[in-house]
Image (cartoon, coloured by chain):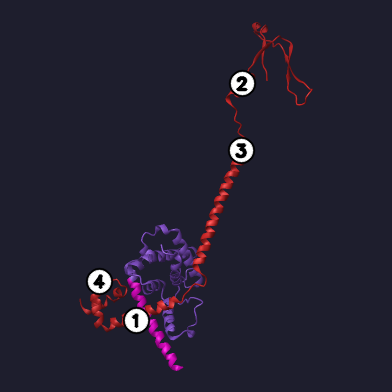
Amino acid sequence: MSRLEDWAPRIYRFALRLTGDRHAAEDLAQETCLRAWRHRQALRNERAERVWLFRIAVNLWRDGIRRTRTAQPLSGAEPDGQPAVEQLAEARDEAQRALKALDRLPPRQREVLYLNACEELKSAEIADVLGISNEAVKSNLSLARKTMRIQLTDDGSIAARGADCR
Amino acid sequence: MNAHSHCDRLDDYLADDLPDTDRREFANHLQVCPECQEAARFHESMAGNLQSAIAAEIPSRPIAAGISRRLSLQRRRRWLAATALAASIVGAILVFNWRSPIVMTPPEIVQARVAETNVTVSFPPNSVLTVPVPASEPGITVMWVYPVVRVAAADSKELNQPIERNVP
């Protein structure tokens, strides 16, 4: 097993998509790393490490939701502490818009699209991480792409209009 | 396979889920299909934007340091629990021994004591038996006095028999 420190930032980012909150994501990432460390003997295939770690994060997150019953849909939620969009350069602004659009997606679509676009996992791997069928992954991915396209096109046209007005 | 069925495979192509032959076939289709080209361009641009946006997301506190701290805390707790368990076991053994001391007596001493306590002696009737016993202070002699009395018995034969008493 490679060093957990190397994985921690990626687990944190995925946890941020799951929780929508920086502190909760930090706790979840830490808990994921701890559990991975305790059960490191269970990892037979080093190549499946990323899928295994993300699956632990998903399971911990779901267990937490079941325990606390405070699960909230994250649509529209914005990770706190994000830098203001106005202060970002144009390229970064576009990236932030994409990230905001991602965070506005329904939870399942957000998770599937994140794992596909950011972690470049295949459908079967995503299905393994989230514990859903391959077909569910594909349909959610297709829906997520369509929604993102609509949102980003709308945002882009609004931004362009706003720029013209100034 | 017609052009429309190729377009249906766009999601599989983007998810990298197509077998090699199908992937090559779709790549050929992509050269000539403007809709799929635009969709693929959008996906790549979106994925690039998302990857650059999430790269800036770093935790406010170092996760690895927190993990090391928690692991060492867990180890310390485990060590303390094991020490406490061992101490309580030793304590329980000590208390048990203090309340019920086990004295091992050699078998030959036991035999001698049995022989001593079961001594049978005969005395004439209406006499007194005196036995000196060790005293706690020097110069003092303690005597145990046992009166020997005749016991009336229904059987006349027993009247002339000596009385048997066990020396305590």
At 45% from the left edge and 60% from the top edge, which residue is drawn?
A37
Question: What type is the residue that disc 1 sits on?
Answer: Phe
Within-10-Å neighbours for mark 2: few <14, some 14–19, many 20+:
few
Question: What type is the residue that disc 4 sits on?
Answer: Asp
Disc 2 chain ID: B
At 45% from the left edge and 58% from the top edge, which residue is drawn?
A38
Disc 4 chain ID: B
Disc 3 chain ID: B
Q: Earlier in the sequence, mark 1 or mark 2?
A: 1
- Depicted B63 relative to depicted A148: above or below: above
Where is residue A161? Give x, y as percent: 42, 91
- Depicted B102 relative to depicted A98: above or below: above
Q: Earlier in the sequence, mark 1 or mark 3?
A: 1
Q: Earlier in the sequence, mark 4 or mark 3?
A: 4
Disc 1 chain ID: B
Q: Nearer the viewer, mark 2 or mark 3?
A: 2
Numbered tag placed on residue B97 in the rendering: 3
Which tint was used for chain A? purple
Residue A94 magenta-drawn?
Answer: no
Within-10-Å neighbours for mark 4: few <14, some 14–19, many 20+:
few
Question: What type is the residue that disc 3 sits on?
Answer: Asn
Where is residue B75? Give x, y as percent: 52, 57
**What residue sits right under mark 4 in the picture?**
B20
Task: Please say if the residues under marks 4 and 1 sit with CB atoms less than 8 Å apart.
Answer: no
Tell me the distance, in whole angstroms, between the alpha carbons under discs 1 and 2: 106 Å
Numbered tag placed on residue B42 in the rendering: 1
**What residue sits right under mark 2 in the picture?**
B112
Q: Which residues are magenta?
A: A138-166
